[in-house]
């Protein structure tokens, strides 16, 4: 099997886990006092898992001078994840998994097309063609349909 196909499968599985994560963290939020508390627990569990895997892999951190020259935005991924997890714990119990996930996916694709168009975060420039933009439009319409009906 081609490596790209495995990565697409990993993306599908990850998307399924993100959908579950919103519902799980929404339930946790109701039980322990709110979405920030649920996100805190979620990140602590995630950190524990990552520390264990990293240790089993031989602690592969490779800090060098290159780390100090990274742009500021290279350090905010965790903060963006915290907003995402907290938001899902807040939103899913109120609007449902399908509405939340469809909005997240539409937002992800809209941002991705823009990031590709402008080569944001050091990515290769890939033009926002009319058909790509049409695909984003369809996803945004899908958010409306999922939420409305």
Image (tube, helix red, strand yellow):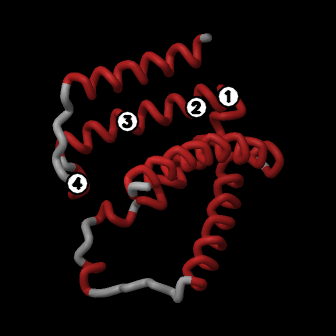
Disc 3/disc 2 C-alpha distance (Å): 14 Å
Depicted 142 relative to depicted 128: above or below: above
Image quarter hosting the N terminus? bottom left
Q: Nearer the viewer, mark 3 or mark 2?
A: 3
Image quarter hosting the C terminus? top right
Q: Which residue is mark 2?
A: 100
Disc 1/disc 4 C-alpha distance (Å): 33 Å
Verify CB contact (< 8 Å) between mark 1 and mark 4: no
Disc 1/disc 2 C-alpha distance (Å): 6 Å
Verify CB contact (< 8 Å) between mark 1 and mark 2: yes
- Picture coordinates of residue 45 (x, y %)? 68, 66
- For marks 1 and 3, the one nearer the N-term is 1
Judged from this view, the residue extending furthest toward the top is 149
Q: Which residue is pictured at 42% across the width and 50% down the height?
A: 5
Q: Which residue is mark 1?
A: 96
Q: Which residue is mark 4?
A: 123
Q: Is residue 37 left or right of residue 138?
A: right
* Marking on residue 109: 3
- Picture coordinates of residue 80 (x, y %)? 46, 53
Verify CB contact (< 8 Å) between mark 1 and mark 3: no
């Amino acid at each position: 099997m081609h490596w790209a196909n495995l990565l697409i499968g990993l993306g599908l599985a990850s998307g399924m886990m993100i959908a579950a994560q919103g519902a799980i963290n929404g339930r946790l939020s109701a039980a322990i006092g709110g979405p920030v508390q649920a996100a805190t627990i979620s990140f602590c569990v995630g950190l524990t898992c990552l520390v264990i895997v990293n240790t089993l892999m031989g602690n592969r951190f490779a800090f060098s001078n290159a780390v100090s020259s990274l742009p500021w935005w290279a350090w905010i991924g965790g903060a963006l994840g915290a907003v995402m997890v907290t938001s899902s714990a807040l939103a899913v119990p109120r609007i449902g998994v399908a509405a939340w996930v469809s909005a997240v996916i539409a937002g992800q694709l809209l941002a991705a097309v823009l990031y590709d168009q402008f080569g944001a975060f050091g990515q290769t420039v890939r033009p926002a063609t009319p058909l790509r933009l049409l695909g984003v439009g369809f996803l945004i319409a899908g958010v409306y349909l999922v939420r409305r009906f």
